[in-house]
Image (cartoon, grey):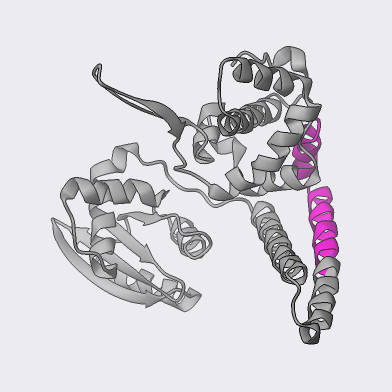
C-alpha cells in the first residue's frame, strides 16, 4: 500500500492506493488532523503503507515527523521529480485529488530509489527556525530600504524609518539567539568551528549550512551538492545535440541563494578557491558558471571538514576538482 500526500498550508489530502484502487480523504494540517489521519489508516488496516510527499517548505514537515514517529516509512521528494513522472504519464488534469493519487503512484513506481526521510534533531530544527526568521527579517529590511530610497511621500518616511529601527533591533536579537543556540549544543558548536575554519564561511553561512543540510545523512560531497541543486545537468544526444551544461537547480534554492555572496568572498579571500576560479576563467567559463562552481566546491570542502572532524587545510583539499 502506498500513501500519497498533497500538502497545503491549511489542509492536506491523503490518497491511499490499495491494489490500484484509491481511498482519498482531506484532513486539517494540524496535530488533530494528523491524529485523524492515523485513525483513518488504522481503520483501513494501512498503518504499514509507504508514504510520500513533495518537499513544500515547512508545511509538510510536522506531518512527516508525525508519521515517522508512528513507524511509517516516509519519503520527501523534490516536486520536479513528481512533475516529470506526471509528464511521463501524459497527465493533463491537475487538482489536489489527482496530485495526491499521482504521488501515491510515483511512490509505488520509485519506491526502491527513494531515500527514507528522517526528521532533523530538535536542536537543528530550532536552529533552522531561527535562521529562516533571520532571512525573513533581512528581506523585510531590504524592502523598507528600497522604499526609503525611492523618495516616498514625506507622510510615510517617519513610519518607514521607525520600522527599519525595529527590524535592525530584531535582526541583532536574532543573530545573538543563533549564536547562543549554537554555543549551547556541543555538536553544533564543534561543527560551526570546523565550517568557519574555511575562508569565506562566516557566522551567517555556517549557521545556514548547519540549519539546512544534515551532513550526516549524505555519503558523498556530490550528494550534498545535489541537495543544493548545484550539480551540472548535461544535454547531449548523438552528434547533433550538444547543449551547454547548466545547473540542475533540482534542490534547495535557499542554499543556492545563501552561498552566492560567500562564494564571491571566497574567491577573494580563499587562495585555494581563488586559484580554482582563475583556472575556470582561463578555460573560458562565464562569470556565473565560475561562481556556481565555487559554490559547489565550498560544499565539497564543508562536507570534507565535517566528515574528517579536522579544520580546513588547503593541502588536503586540492583545487583541481
Residue 320, percent across and down?
A: 62, 13
Q: Residue 99, relative to residue 202: is it above or below? A: below
At a point 34% along the width and 62% down the height, the residue shown is 5
Bounds of the magenta segment: 170-197
**Quadrant in which residue 151 is drawn:** bottom right
Residue 146, percent across and down?
A: 72, 66
At a point 49% along the width and 65% down the height, the residue shown is 59
Q: Is residue 234 left or right of residue 111?
A: right
Residue 287, percent across and down?
A: 60, 31
Residue 220, percent across and down?
A: 54, 27
**Quadrant in which residue 198 is drawn:** top right
Q: Is residue 74 left or right of residue 105?
A: right
Is 251 contained in the magenta span?
no
**Quadrant in which residue 96 is drawn:** bottom left
Is 174 contained in the magenta span?
yes
Tell me which secondary structure the magenta stretch mostly adopts. helix
Q: Residue 266, relative to residue 55: is it above or below? A: above
Q: Quadrant of the N terminus?
A: bottom left
- Whether residue 105 is visible, yes or no, is yes
At a point 33% along the width and 37% down the height, the residue shown is 113
Q: Is residue 119 left or right of residue 49?
A: right
Relative depth, front residue between 15 and 156: 156
Relative depth, front residue between 157 and 291: 157
Amino acid at each position: 500500500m502506498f500513501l500519497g500526500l498533497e500538502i497545503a498550508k491549511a489542509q492536506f489530502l491523503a490518497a491511499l492506493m490499495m491494489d490500484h484502487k484509491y481511498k482519498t480523504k482531506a484532513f486539517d494540517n494540524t496535530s488533530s488532523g494528523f491524529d485523524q489521519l492515523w485513525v483513518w489508516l488504522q481503520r483501513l488496516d494501512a498503518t504499514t503503507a509507504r508514504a510520500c510527499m513533495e518537499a513544500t517548505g515547512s508545511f509538510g514537515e510536522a506531518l512527516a515527523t508525525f508519521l515517522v514517529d508512528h513507524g511509517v516509512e516516509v519519503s520527501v521528494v523534490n516536486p520536479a521529480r513528481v512533475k516529470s513522472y506526471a509528464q511521463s504519464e501524459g497527465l493533463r488534469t491537475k487538482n489536489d485529488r489527482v496530485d495526491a493519487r499521482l504521488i501515491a503512484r510515483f511512490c509505488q513506481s520509485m519506491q526502491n530509489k527513494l531515500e527514507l526521510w528522517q526528521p532533523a534533531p530538535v536542536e537543528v530544527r530550532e536552529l533552522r527556525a531561527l535562521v529562516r526568521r533571520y532571512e525573513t527579517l533581512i528581506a523585510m529590511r531590504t524592502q523598507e530600504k528600497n522604499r526609503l530610497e525611492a523618495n516616498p511621500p514625506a507622510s510615510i518616511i517617519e513610519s518607514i524609518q521607525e520600522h527599519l529601527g525595529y527590524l535592525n533591533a530584531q535582526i541583532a536579537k536574532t543573530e545573538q539567539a543563533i549564536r547562543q543556540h549554537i554555543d549551547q549544543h556541543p555538536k553544533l558548536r564543534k561543527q560551526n568551528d570546523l565550517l568557519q575554519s574555511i575562508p569565506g564561511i562566516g557566522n551567517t553561512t555556517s549557521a545556514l549550512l548547519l540549519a539546512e543540510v544534515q551532513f550526516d545523512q549524505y555519503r558523498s560531497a556530490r550528494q550534498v551538492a545535489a541537495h543544493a541543486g548545484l550539480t551540472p545537468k548535461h544535454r547531449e544526444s548523438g552528434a547533433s545535440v550538444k547543449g551547454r551544461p547548466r545547473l540542475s537547480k533540482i534542490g534547495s534554492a535557499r542554499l543556492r541563494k545563501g552561498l552566492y555572496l560567500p562564494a564571491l568572498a571566497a574567491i577573494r579571500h580563499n587562495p585555494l578557491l581563488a586559484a580554482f576560479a582563475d583556472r575556470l576563467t582561463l578555460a573560458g567559463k562565464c562569470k556565473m558558471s565560475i561562481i556556481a562552481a565555487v559554490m559547489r566546491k565550498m560544499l565539497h570542502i564543508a562536507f570534507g571538514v565535517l566528515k574528517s572532524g579536522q579544520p580546513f587545510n588547503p593541502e588536503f583539499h586540492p583545487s583541481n576538482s
